[in-house]
Amino acid sequence: MLGNFEYHNPTKLYFGKDSLDYLDEELKNYGKTVQLIYGGGSIKKNGIYDKVVKILKQNGKTIVEDGGVMPNPTVEKLYDGIRIARENKVDFLLAVGGGSCCDYAKAVSVSVNCKEDPWEKYYIRFEEPTCDIIPVGCVLTMAGTGSEMNGGSVITNHSQKLKIGHVFGDEVMPKFSILNPEFTFSLPQKQTVAGIYDIFNHICEQYFSGTDDNVSDYLAEGLMKSVVASSYKVIKNPTDYEARSNIMWAATWALNTLIAKGKSTDWMVHMLGQAVGAYTDATHGLTLAAVSLPYYRYIMPYGLKKFARFATEIWKVDPTDKTDEQTAAEGLSAMEKWMKDIGLTLKISELGATGDMIDGITAATLILDGGYKVLTKDEVKEILKESL
Ligand code: NZQ
Ligand code: ZN
């Protein structure tokens, strides 16, 4: 049964080949000085930077450059972004990139006018913003995180060995996001599959909970099927527009809160993956892939019916003459095959994790209680060892 909930998503989306045209219109709603946030240079190589700068200039905007946002943005980079915004009195933050740029822009937006240390305030004490927030817009170049239509902002603190996400409210979410699937054509294969698994796992995190009949689970199944089907197409042909567009749209719906409505949610794969990320700085989606199978195989008995449903609905496992255990286990094996087919890494050791890090990664793993089994720290450790 659906519980009580509120649903509102304030982010306006422009989707499709011509979606960047709408940047022109949107920019008229914001002030003159724009902090242009981007990553390590991919947008300069694929021409997106030039297109965006042209539109900013047409609108008479003063552009304040803020490039070099790294994958898994760090707290040091956040301090740098806050300094840039303060020194230039920026009116608007335009993130052009993947989840890292978009997450970073949100973190800057809530920190520029805030006297307190943002790491302590938002990522350790999980407080809400109490100062004026600078509006954020996003031109997305990588499909995966859903950051384009949610309030999530993940920051990594290497000195504290912590990678933590804060989910901010409506007022911090991008005012608009521009989603042109063609902008993802230039993604390296590794990033494409990392994004695909990130999407798939966002759906799993919201699917593997509860025993009720819930519309959110049917929506989740539809999204999962689409992601799996498109993943094979895009691996074969990275410029398959149909597949890229389906992946991009599925990513947004996988994590814009819709499919979590009326449900509790798990998020333990993300907690494990983020802790691995804090130690290795590995690509987000790959950390999730590498811990997923040991985790799901471990919790499967606690949510057996749902795992059997996952097997028959997503992986077309025939349940005839099989126990739920057998059906569910076959489903996870089919998922494993798919993960291998698209070239995902299934071991955290391949991402830089070593045996001597296990205790630290265990300590850095936050334990949540929305899934089928509340893990103990010993169980977390066993799952991590199994993932090595
Ligand atoms: O930095 P550049 O040169 O732009 O290269 C990037 C980066 O190296 C490259 N890239 C992006 N678009 C490209 C491209 N290369 C060629 N062509 C393009 N069109 O891809 C690399 C990865 O980019 P990044 O933005 O880091 O990837 P992603 O979108 O996966 O974002 C990862 C961050 O988002 C957080 C993760 O933890 C991680 O810090 N997450 C945010 C969430 C949220 N806001 O709700 C939820 C997620 O679970 C996740 O935790
Ligand atoms: Zn994720």
Image: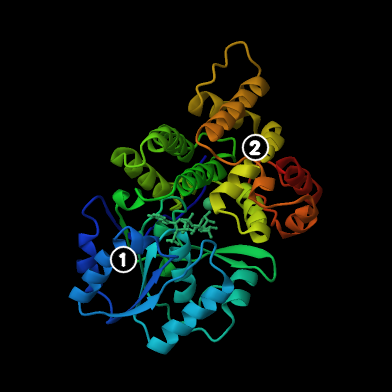
Mark 2 / mark 1, whichever is N-terminal: 1
**Residue 208 in sight:** yes
**Residue 264 in sight:** no
Going by the numbered disc 2, the residue's amino acid type is Leu
**Dot label at residue 99:** none
Where residue 351 appears, as percent x and y from the top left, is 64, 50
Q: Nearer the viewer, mark 2 or mark 1?
A: 1
Disc 2 vs disc 1: Cβ atoms closer than 8 Å? no
- Kindly identify the residue that appears in the image at 65 percent across and 29 percent down: 304
How are the residues colored?
rainbow
Query: On the rendered structure, is 346 left or right of 173?
Result: right
Question: Does 340 sit above or below residue 286?
Answer: above
Where residue 186 appears, as percent x and y from the top left, is 36, 50
Q: Which residue is mark 1?
A: 49
Q: Which residue is mark 2?
A: 293
Identify the image quadrant of residue 115. Answer: bottom right
Q: Nearer the viewer, residue 212 or 288?
A: 288
SS category of the residue bearing label 2: helix
Identify the image quadrant of residue 297. Answer: top right
